[in-house]
Amino acid sequence: MKTNTWLKRCVAGTAAITVALTPQTLAIPQEAGSPNQSSNIRLAISLPQPIDESDLEQYRQMLDLSDAQVIFSHHAHESYVERFQGLARTKFEDLTKLSALAGDALGEGYTPAAGALQAEFSDLQSEIEQGIVAIDEELFARMSAVLSESQLNRMPRVQWHRERARSFPLDVFVRAARIDLARLIDQQKLAPQSMEAIEAMQIEYEAQLTPLIASLKREAKKNSVARMNALISYFYAPNGERLEEGTPEATARGEVYLRNLKTLSEQEGRTERRLAELNNQFVPRFLGVMMASEAREFEKQFLEAGYPVLYPDPTDPRDLLDELVDFPTLDPAVKEALQAMRQRHRESYKSVCKEMANEYDNWYETIARTRAQGDYESYREKMRTLRAKRWKLNEDCIQQLADTLGNWDADYSNRLREMQQDVAAIRERGETDGFPGM
């Protein structure tokens, strides 16, 4: 039995099912009439981890707890862990069983029975999550009882931190929406002066980030069951009767399914893009108050995580330019020329990269909003044109470097020749590669 045309265009049936289309797999769901051959299908269990000692340490720093308050919070946390473990013992086994039962049902196709089991699984998972939220809030209430007024004013930030932790990882298409910059900052261990300069800005960021993430998580959870039901309605009538495929009526049902999928996914896609935009708005602000070495590493981590098809760029001469500008015995006139060259290159380079990032985000926002592939050839052509433009900028910069330095230093002359050869080889491979991919 051949897969219908409308099904080929479909990018995601339900992100809650490990064998259905997710932002990671981008596979095509099988037809309900053809049993899935995978014998280990399971619904993905996604539950928050308990608050642990590392979280308590972050809370201590956020609230500036005294030694006595730290001891109290650890005692409160011991009770919290006991309650969390009790919830896990009573509910998690049932959830695991439902995951297996629903997976077995999906092995038979997208049937009403599979849909009912998925809904039951989703309800139980939500019930467990609500129980975890209640246990979290009980811990925070106990901690709040021993806080001063100024510390209580900081307590919302602790709660934001936990709410984001309960929501991650985000199963999204727009990759820059997956990143929590506050977490990146914490992981980087900035110098005290940088942390002091960044704190107010970080709180502003977290206040905007947290509700967006919570909203996206709620939408995704609500829509996962609805997407499954929409797919089942293509294959089965409300009375459970199996419907024919390959008919004009089936084509019409397929179009209804795609419209329903777009309606369900529209807000999720918009929120994903808003998260990506928020991150891109705050990254330069954070960079502006960090030390140079910290800023360089922070920007690198964000760009490579959010835009993996664009970064790292092996043709970028930035490192060599920085090294040369800082060279201690460089002639002042040459140094000035290199500084101007670096400035021109970075401005042009960032402009092209911004265009590429925008196209990349546009493409995945469209998939997130419609769960269907758009005009890939148009996207591919734009991205490859911009990549070629970025290569040319780097090639020209390397050539200008070589012309400016002349025979000043043999080692640098050799490095520049090697860079030119590398860029040429990358260009040649790029003529037949699969960039930017799906």
Image (cartoon, rainbow, N blue to C red):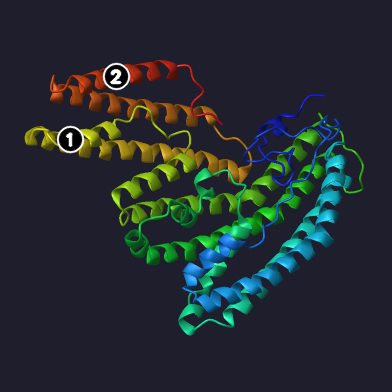
Q: Which quarter of the image is occupied by the N terminus?
A: top right
Give the residue displayed 65% in from the left and 35% down from the top: 25
Name which residue type carries label 1: Phe
Q: Residue at x 62, y 43 (%)?
A: 370
Within 10 Å of the Cα at label 2, are there few (<14), some (14-19), or many (20+) other Cα atoms?
some
Residue visible at 37% across and 37% down in the picture: 353
Say if residue 345 shows up in the picture: yes
Q: Earlier in the sequence, mark 1 or mark 2?
A: 1
52 or 133: which is nearer to us? 52
Q: Amino acid at mark 2?
A: Gln
The residue at the point 38 percent across, 45 percent down is 297
Q: Nearer the viewer, residue 303 or 192?
A: 192
Q: Position of residue 336 (x, y in %)?
A: 11, 37
Secondary structure under tag 2 reads helix
Q: Nearer the viewer, mark 1 or mark 2?
A: 1
| Side of 43 where 409 appears, left or right | left
Q: Does residue 58 lie above or below 154 as drawn? A: above
Image quadrant in which you'd find residue 233: top right
Q: Is residue 211 visible?
A: no
- Residue occupied by mark 2: 420
Report the residue marked by disc 1: 327
Q: Are marks 1 and 2 in contact (CB under 8 Å)?
A: no
Q: Position of residue 47 (x, y in %)?
A: 70, 55
Residue 382 position, x and y percent, is 43, 30
Secondary structure beneath dot 1 equals loop
Identify whether 148 is placed above or below 377: below
Q: Is residue 323 left or right of residue 336?
A: right
Q: State the image quarter where residue 425 is shown.
A: top left
